[in-house]
Image (tube, rainbow, N blue to C red):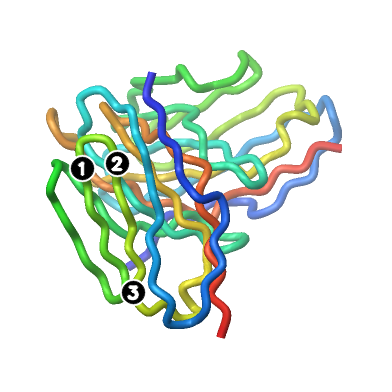
Amino acid sequence: EDQVTQSPEALRLQEGESSSLNCSYTVSGLRGLFWYRQDPGKGPEFLFTLYSAGEEKEKERLKATLTKKESFLHITAPKPEDSATYLCGGTSGSRLTFGEGTQLTVNP
Amino acid sequence: GAGVSQSPRYKVAKRGQDVALRCDPISGHVSLFWYQQALGQGPEFLTYFQNEAQLDKSGLPSDRFFAERPEGSVSTLKIQRTQQEDSAVYLCASSLSFHPTISYEQYFGPGTRLTVT
């Protein structure tokens, strides 16, 4: 059974203070590791897909990386507008198995 | 372009009532998914369609839950005889296509928040 675990559950940063969010996964035959951002009252917004260990993708202040057991979402010099819940999901077929998310708060 | 839309956005049902939740996927997207999200949790898979075929319904929590996509576009999730534990946000997602070895990203709608009283 696919499992995804995210840590920490909550993270509070000062504006400009870089950090990383962790996603550990047990997905046999990984066909994609996905990162989403979710704002309160909204659906998850797609950020990145990673397919193989060693792959990296960047978008503005965010960079996602993938190893054989984990994925990291690095946030460089975050701004208050980066505050949201970040979800990680993996799949070995079609359905996504999500972690419980990391709630990020960036204070000005 | 237009994203995934869902209606209604909010639904309050009395215990025992039937409800129907609608999803309009992105035009041309072959795959459609339903997820259930409890407060403070990640989304949990309910069911998956490829065109009009329901290929996986293993996540549906009971036989009170039923989903359909008769013409391969709009989908409806129906919950019969609602119970308090059905209270959650129901998310719909669509994906462009299907590939035998990789999975395409899923685009989510805003969700329907169901409250059963």
- Where B37 falls versus A47 (above or below)? above
Camera-nearest residue between B107 and B78:
B107
Q: Residues within 10 Å of mark 1 (few under 14, many from 20)?
A: some
Q: Amino acid at mark 1?
A: Thr
At which x and y percent is residue A34?
31, 47
How far is the residue under mark 2 from the one under mark 1?
Answer: 5 Å
- Where B93 falls versus A1 (above or below)? below
- Where B116 falls versus B94 (above or below)? above
How far is the residue under mark 2 from the one under mark 3?
Answer: 19 Å
Q: Amino acid at mark 2?
A: Glu
Q: Residues within 10 Å of mark 2 (few under 14, many from 20)?
A: some
Asked if both marks, 1 and 3, belong to the same chain, the answer given is yes
Answer left or right for A7 relative to A52: right
Asked if both marks, 2 and 3, belong to the same chain, the answer given is yes
- Picture quarter with the N terminus of chain B: bottom left
Label 1 sits on residue: A67
**What chain is tagged by disc 3?**
A
- Picture quarter with the C terminus of chain B: top right
Q: Secondary structure at mark 3?
A: loop
Label 2 sits on residue: A70
| Mark 2 or mark 3, earlier in chain | 2
At which x and y percent is residue B11?
73, 47
What numbered label is drawn on residue A76? 3
Camera-nearest residue between A18 and A29:
A18
User: Given contact means CB atoms under 8 Å apart, are the residues at marks 2 and 1 in contact?
Assistant: yes
Q: Secondary structure at mark 2?
A: strand
| Mark 1 or mark 3, earlier in chain | 1
**What chain is tagged by disc 1?**
A
**What chain is tagged by disc 2?**
A
Residue at the image position 56 percent from the left and 67 percent from the top? A12
Camera-nearest residue between A41 and A90:
A90
